[in-house]
Amino acid sequence: MAGIYIHVPFCKQACHYCDFHFSTSVKKKPEMVEAICKELLLRKEEIKNEVETIYLGGGTPSLLSAEELAQIFQVINENYSITTDAEITLEANPDDLAEEKIKMLSASPVNRLSIGVQSFFEEDLRLMNRAHHAEEALESIKLAKQYFKNISIDLIYGIPGMSNERWKENLKIALDLGVPHISSYALTVEPKTALKSMIEKGKVAPVEEELAKEQYEILIETLSAAGFDNYEFSNFGKPAFFSRNNTAYWFGKAYLGIGPSAHSFDGFKRKWNISNNTLYIKALQKGEIPAEVEKLSISDRYNELVMTRLRTKWGIAVDEVERSFGRKFKDYLLREATKLVESGMLEWNDNRLQVSKKGKFLSDGIAADLFWVEE
Ligand code: SF4
């Protein structure tokens, strides 16, 4: 089984915290869609198996028109074998989700919406420079629910000025709306973002790690009590609503990344396309794929498995480590894990190594302690 990821690199305006690849000028959108279709065509041989997930991410894929979406799905249908029950997700921003648009999307192959809400409060949305307003966040979800069963929303915690009370209220609103999946991330201050410079100039209060940790705990507690399974560090789903796209990624399945800055993985190599819309379009017009490739060593692959699996509820299956990487890596993992188990950060469950409740917020650091470091 395999997945296709398509990066749609346009946004109405730049969110202050964002370091993804996108342009706020949509002038080149038609040429970009052409180039994406061409890349899909040129790389079809790279996917040998049936495709079970398609994910349109970005940027803002909800900026695509009905015709542009149809153009992309036509190339996919004519050149790839898609399972009948494939999960087809489109990331959408609330300000794009008027009823006509949602109707159009529900008539397209898209069967899952991932809505970039981030917060239901105007103060937070303005601080982050989101293009939508609090009212639109509410309305878009109410409308989307009339046409889609499978809806996820994104929420951000740790926003400067957002109290625990306001965070609890955000979660309450999400629960009252009845969405079956929530992805929630701590606000991170990335280099070269507007947020970073605003904090440096004292215009915005710094992000407090301790507050983010408290809000993460509130998140887990509130959503668990409401019947959500915290199946990955940042992802919470009701049964049968886990993201199949994300789960496939954490389990190392192959995926084809199409569009500028998109990453691909075939189990052994990573490829990433150029992060420049003009150069990407020009290359595809000449029939070239503007990508760099990195072959992963066995220790890179082991480290990636440790990193991604420890963030999931399934943890690291020791048998799988031995099967995929050999006895040497399994013994290394067992040895390095001993101290972390003794300190209560990791625990054993059915021959799987999992992060304990105590270690949860620190799972990336714990993973780093288990990494194989080449001499
Ligand atoms: S809409 Fe998404 S991709 Fe676009 S700037 Fe905001 S966070 Fe970044």
Image (cartoon, rainbow, N blue to C red):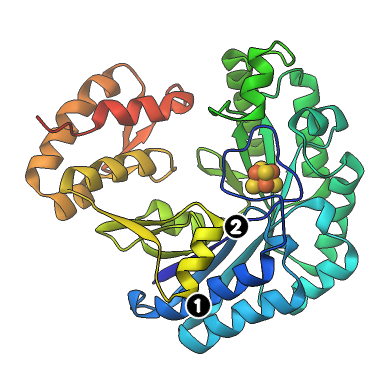
Pointer 2: what residue?
57
Looking at the image, is 53 positioned above or below residue 193? below
Tell me the SS state at disc 1.
helix
Comparing 116 with 229, the one in front is 116
Looking at the image, is 214 positioned above or below residue 155? above
Looking at the image, is 320 positioned above or below residue 112? above
Q: Residue furthest top?
A: 202
Hey, which quadrant is residue 106 in on the image? bottom right
Pointer 1: what residue?
38
**Residue at coordinates 46% horizontally, 28% vertically from top-left?**
360
**Residue at coordinates 74% horizontally, 19% vertically from top-left?**
164
Q: Residue furthest bottom?
A: 78
* Residue 218 visible from this viewpoint: no
Label 2: how many residues lie within 10 Å, few (<14), some (14-19) or many (20+)? Answer: many
Q: Position of residue 214 (x, y in %)?
A: 62, 19
Q: Earlier in the sequence, mark 1 or mark 2?
A: 1
Q: Nearer the viewer, mark 1 or mark 2?
A: 1
Label 1: how many residues lie within 10 Å, few (<14), some (14-19) or many (20+)? Answer: many
> Mark 2 and mark 1 in contact (Cβ < 8 Å)?
no
Identified by mark 1, the residue type is Lys
